[in-house]
């Protein structure tokens, strides 16, 4: 009975190991760091639609792998030179970290919100600003021609207003001191 239990345990471990290996195959190793199939797959999935097709898939996959290898080689060299301790690098890392946190906050706050203007808002803007919406010949451009630009402008304006309002709310709840 012990033999059967041991045999079963070995088979389970072997199949689990085999399953794990097929799940995330190591494609390359750089100084002990493993570059896996899933890392390459994640980048392949993030590429814009239409970039990868049946004819170029293998070549792009190889390029992605080579890019990951190059990135790791460069990172290892930077670490050998202790660049992560360089004051300027430390400051840049902090700035990037701060930007990532701010972007995450804004995505959480506004990510699901639509800022698209209504047809009425677009038309009202067009009518109120006709005199400023002339082409190079001095002719007022038809709404149908400049509608996308107006929509983008109004979308950006709404985003800016929402962000400005949010910042003002935060300033009221935080202690802000301006020294003059």
Image: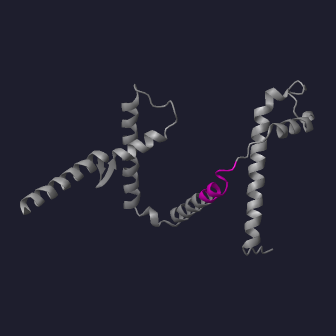
Can residue 78 be seen in the rendering of this structure? Answer: yes
Is 115 above or below relative to 149? below
Is 108 above or below relative to 115? below
Left or right of residue 33, residue 166 in this image:
right
Left or right of residue 37, residue 124 in this image:
right
Image quadrant containing the C terminus = bottom right
Tally the marks: 0
Image quadrant containing the N terminus = bottom left
Q: Residue at x 43, y 39 (%)?
A: 44
Left or right of residue 77, residue 86 in this image:
right
Q: Residue at x 78, y 47 (%)?
A: 157
Closer-to-camera residue (12/66) = 12
Give residue 61's position: percent from left, percent from top. 38, 36
Closer-to-camera residue (3/168) = 3
Q: Which color mode does the image show? A: one colour
Give residue 30's position: percent from left, percent from top. 31, 51
Is 155 above or below relative to 57? below
Give the extent of the magenta segment: 103-113
Q: Residue at x 75, y 52 (%)?
A: 160
Give residue 68's position: percent from left, percent from top. 39, 46
Identify the image quadrant of residue 96.
bottom right
């Amino acid at each position: 009975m012990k033999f059967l239990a041991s045999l079963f345990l070995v088979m389970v471990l072997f199949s689990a190991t085999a399953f794990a290996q097929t799940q995330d195959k190591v494609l390359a190793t750089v100084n002990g760091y493993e570059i896996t199939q899933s890392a390459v797959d994640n980048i392949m999935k993030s590429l814009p639609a239409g970039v990868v097709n049946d004819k170029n898939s293998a070549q792009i996959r190889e390029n992605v792998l080579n890019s990951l290898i190059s990135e790791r080689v460069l990172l290892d060299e930077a670490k050998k030179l202790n660049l992560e301790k360089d004051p300027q690098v430390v400051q840049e890392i902090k700035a990037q970290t701060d930007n990532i946190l701010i972007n995450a906050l804004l995505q959480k706050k506004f990510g699901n919100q639509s800022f698209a203007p209504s047809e009425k808002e677009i038309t009202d803007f067009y009518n109120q600003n006709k005199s400023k919406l002339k082409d190079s010949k001095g002719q007022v451009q038809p709404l149908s021609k400049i509608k996308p630009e107006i929509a983008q402008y109004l979308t950006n304006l709404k985003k800016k207003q929402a962000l400005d309002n949010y910042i003002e709310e935060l300033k009221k709840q935080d202690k802000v001191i301006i020294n003059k």
